[in-house]
Each structure stands twice: as C-alpha cells, then as structure tokens.
Amino acid sequence: MGNGILVIGSANVDLVVKLDKIPNPGETIGDGQFHQFCGGKGANQAVAAARSGQNVVFAGLVGDDAYGDAVIENLKAASIDTQYLHKEKEAHTGIALISVSSSGENAISIAPGANKKLGIKRIDQLESVIASASLALLQLEIPFETCVRVIELAGQHGTRVMLNPAPSDRRATELIGSTDLLVVNEHEAYDISGLPTESDAEIALAAEWLFDRGAKHVIVTLGSRGVFLKDEIRSEFLPTFEVEAVDTTGAGDAFCGTLACEFSRTDSIEEGIKYALAASAISVTRLGAQEALPTRKEVHAFLAEYSR
Ligand code: RIB
C-alpha cells in the first residue's frame, strides 16, 4: 500500500431522524425526517482521509446483509482498498440509530453487530499490511484487545499509530504510551485521565497528564472552541472556524481522518490541525457523518475563503 493509512475499525449504517429536539426518555416526537447514511467511526475516518487524497486501506467486519453491501460499495466509491473488509456470517452489520436536533446536536444508540467480532486472528493476518502502512488509525468501536494487538504489531514494525479512543474506555491509558497522535474530546480526556476538563486550565492539565503517559502529540478537541495541543514543544489552544451547525455527527471523525491524512503527508502537526479543523467545520454544516465529509478541493476553497 506504499505510504498510505491503514484504518482498522468499525463500519455502520446510520439510520438518522432529524427532529426539532432530541426526545427525552419516554417521550415520542413525530414530524422527523428520515435519512440513511453509511457511518461508523472507523469507516468515517477512512473516508475522511481518502477524500483528502490519501491511499487508504480499511480493515473491519460487516454482516452478510444488504447493509453490509451498502457499506462496502460506499468505501469502494471513495477509492478505499476494501480487500480486508470481510463479511461475518454470524452477525448483522453495525447499526447506529441517530436523532439530530435542529441545533445540530445528536443522540446515538449503537448495535455494533459484526464490529465486535473483529478478533486478534484477523489482525495477525494483517501483519504485513500493518508493517507497510505509514500510519495505523484506530478508534474503540472494535474489541479493545484487537486494538492492543494492532498497536503491538505496529510497534514491532515501526508503524506510527494514531488513536482516537472513542467511545471512551479507561483501559486506553494502557495504549497511550505507544501512540504518536492521541485525539480525545474533553469527555474522553476526563474518562481516561480521571481529571476534570471543565475550565481551560483543567483541559491543559488533563492534556499534560496524557502527554506524560507517552503520547507524542495530544490533541483535545473542544467542538466550536477548536482544540488544545500538547506535545514536546507546544501547549496551546488553537481556535476553529465559525460555522452554522446543521449536524455535528461525525465531526470528530472528519477531524481525525483528515489529521491522519495531513500529518502523514506533511509531518507537520500544525498544518495537519489547521486542515483538519477546516474539514470538520465544513462537515458540521451538512447532514450525515460520512456523507458530510469534504474533498481536499473543498477544504482548500474553505481555507482560502477564511484567509481573506
Ligand atoms: O462518530 C459518528 C459515528 O458514531 C456514526 O457514524 C455512528 O455510526 C457511530 O459509530
């Protein structure tokens, strides 16, 4: 795969209802509009990197059903190498039920199905692919032990690792020391470090805690406030672009996938973050996670517009 990115992760179908507001427990709200998109944090991040021009290989599992076919077709349409995306006979394709409010907020329920069957055996079969990738990109929607094995093999072959420990899992502390890039939101930073992340000073301390555990670059994403970056030379807040949010689902995936792409391409964390902030800002102005991901041309046009 040359110097491309290997994403090992989840692939879902997102069943989305756009409503005025997200229902409370026990509440029913009618008048929603239904949309079906391809999703899953792994697949979203893979598509984000591919639309920005990277060679991407995606490894994962879908069910042997029509949703699985839709996921595979969608990844192929983004020019992603899907030879290691298999169909699992014993499980359904991962499904996410997503409510999106008029202000762009969401509530997500996931039935992971095949994603949770991605075991260590499959990873061992991928050793040469891991070895030849320039970067392995991981999230936590597949079994934790599977991620551990990917990171072990990446370490043995000198392949860089980017980890987005979402949904958060305290055990992620075990993995931090082997990551080149760690991207967390403030909730994940809190869950993993155990430190509060409400004020700016607290966010900086939590990022420092994560950095001290061995991640080379720690990035805490803060939604409309941008990100906090902590590494050997920087400890700073970087603002994002102001946009009108339609749907924030997958904004973190847009950020991670495009950061992986730009960081691998340029080796510059600042360039990567600037590009990724623009990509995720564009993504929140559109409905859907994967559907909303911009192309490289769109990101450059957006950056040119903002630099005027
Ligand atoms: O990050 C957004 C993604 O989370 C959605 O696409 C959904 O499938 C869940 O995995």
Image (cartoon, rainbow, N blue to C red):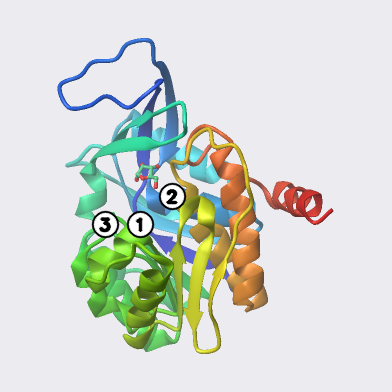
Q: Is residue 90 left or right of residue 247?
A: left
Give the position of the N terminus as an image quadrant: bottom right
Residue 142's disc is 3
> Circle 2 is placed at which residue position?
43
Cβ(mark 2) to ligand 1 < 8 Å?
A: yes
The answer to the question of whether label 1 and label 2 lie on touching residues, with beta carbons closer than 8 A, is yes
Real-space Cα separation, disc 2 to disc 3, in angstroms: 12 Å
Going 59% across and 61% down the picture, which residue do you hit? 239
Quadrant of ligand 1 in image: top left
Cβ(mark 3) to ligand 1 < 8 Å?
A: no
SS of the residue under disc 1: loop
The answer to the question of whether label 2 and label 3 lie on touching residues, with beta carbons closer than 8 A, is no
- In this rendering, is residue 31 above or below 85? above
Q: Amino acid at mark 1?
A: Gly
Q: Amino acid at mark 2?
A: Ala
Residue 26: quarter of image: top left
Q: Is residue 123 left or right of residue 251?
A: left
> Circle 1 is placed at which residue position?
9
